[in-house]
Amino acid sequence: MTRPPDRPGRVVHDWAPTPLPGTVFDPLPHRLLHEEPVARVRLPHGEGHAWLVTRYEDVKLVSADPRLSRAATVGRPITSMTPHTLAPAGGVGRADPPDHTRLRRLIAPTFGRRRMAALRAHTERTAEAHALRTLETGPPADLAETFVGPLSATVVAELLGVPAADLDRVQTWRAGLLSNATTAAAGEAVKKEIAGYFADLARHRAAHPGDDLVSELAAARETGGISTPELVSMAVMLTLNGLDAVRNIVSTMVYVLLTHPAQTAKLREDPARLPRAVDELLRYIPQRDGVGMPRVATADVEVGGVTIREGEAVYVFYPAANRDPSVYTEPDRLDLARDEAPHLAFGHGAHYCAGAQLARMEAEVMLTTLLTGFPALRLAVPPDEIAWRAGTVNRGPEALPVTW
Ligand code: HEM
C-alpha cells in the first residue's frame, strides 16, 4: 500500500506543558495552530504519539465525527497528560452511543431550565452571604479561596446532594486526582476511595431520596438505567468539574477583569453586557494545561488535509481553536464586546460540556455580585506577583489577593 504524502518525515513534537502564569498561552499549540494545524505530539505519559488538532473548523469536525470514538480509547496506553487516566471506563467522557446517549439523558433534567433557575436563586443568595462576609473581614481578601472556591463547592454539593461536611474530603481527592505529579498507583488509590464514597452515598440516597442528582441516579439504578460504576463515575466527574473547573476559571475571569480596567469599567456601566463578556472570557482564557481526553479513529478520517488512520489517537485543543485567526479578529486580544463565532471552551458535539449552563450561571452570578458589591475592587498586589497553580490539569491562581 502506498503511503499518502502527509506521513513520511512528519516530526513528532514533544509536548510537556510547563506551568504558565495568568492567561499566557502555551507556545507550542499556538505555533501549531498557525503552522501545522494537524500535528503529531508526544505527551509526558503513555506510549507512542497522537495527532493534535488546533484549528476551529478541524476541532469541530473531530469532536462531532462519530468515527472518532471515545469508547475505543479504553484499555489503550495512549500518550497522555497524566500518568493515570482521569476518566474511568464507564464514564460519560469515554462512552459512545448508545451508552453515551443514555447517560446524558439521565442527567439532562438536572441541568435543565427549571433546575438551573432554582439553582440560580440559591447561588445568588449564597454569593450575597459570601460577599457580606468578605466585606466584614477584609480588605484584603483572597477571592479564590474565600469567595469563588467555597461558592462553587456549595453549588455542586447542592446539585449532587453531597453533605457540606464532606466537601473537605472531596477537595483533597480533587487535589490528588488532578495533579500531573500523581503517580499511577496514587491516582488509582484516590479513585478507589472516591468510588467507595459515592457508592455509599448512592446507597444512602436510594433509601432516603432527596431533590438531588445522586438520588435520581440511585433511582435510575434500581430500574436498570445506570450501573454502579457508571453512577460513581458520573458523580466523580460532576463533582470534580463543578469544584475545580469553576473555581479556577471564575477566579481567572476576575483576574482578567481587574487587569483590563477600561473594559471592566464599561461593563460596570452596562451590566446587560455581562453574558457576552462571560463568553468572551471563556474564549480568551486558556483554561487548562495540555489536552483532555483523546479519541481513536474507527476508520480512516480526513482532517485538514491529513488522513488519521484507523486505530490512531487524536486530541483536540479547544483553547487553540478559540484563538483561530480565520474565525476571530485579533484572537489574542480580549474584547468583552466581541460578537463573533461561538467559542469552543465547552467543547463541541456529543461530548459538549454537560455543565455549560451551570458554569455560565455561576460565572454571571459571581461576577455580578463582585462588580456591584465592590465598586473599587482591585488586585492587592502587582499582577506578576500572583502565584498560579502548577502541575494541575486546570489552570488558575493559587490565591487571588484583592482589596477595595
Ligand atoms: C467553566 C467551567 C467549565 C469548562 C470550561 C468546562 C469544559 C468542558 C470541556 C472542554 C469538556 C469536554 C468536551 C469533550 O470531551 O470533548 C467538558 C465535558 C464535561 N463537563 Fe465541563 N466544563 C466546565 C464546567 C463544568 C461543570 C460545572 C460541570 C458539572 C457540574 C461539568 C460537567 C461536564 C461533564 C459531565 C462533561 C462530560 C460530557 C460528555 O463527555 O458527554 N463541566 N467540559
Image (cartoon, rainbow, N blue to C red):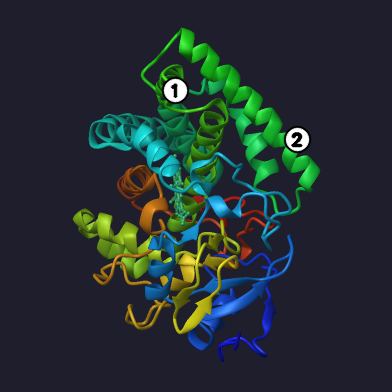
Secondary structure of the residue carrying tag 2 is helix
Q: Considering only order in the chain, which callout, 2 or 1, is on the residue closer to the N terminus?
A: 2
The residue most toward the front is 1
Relative vertical location of residue 19 with respect to residue 107 in this rendering, above or below: below
- What's the residue type where badge 1 is placed? Gly
Residue 375: tell me if it is visible. yes
**Mark carried by residue 10:** none
In the figure, is residue 335 to the left or right of 51? left
| Quarter location, residue 268 | bottom left
Amino acid beneath label 2 = Ala
From where the camera sits, is residue 169 visible? no
Residue 152 placement, left or right of 16:
left
Q: Which residue is mark 2?
A: 189
**Nearest the eye: 12 or 266:** 12
Q: Is residue 302 above or below residue 227?
A: below
| Above/below status of 280 relative to 126 | below
Image-quadrant location for residue 133 = top left
Residue drawn at x 33%, y 60% as measured from the top left: 279
For disc 1, the marked residue is 224
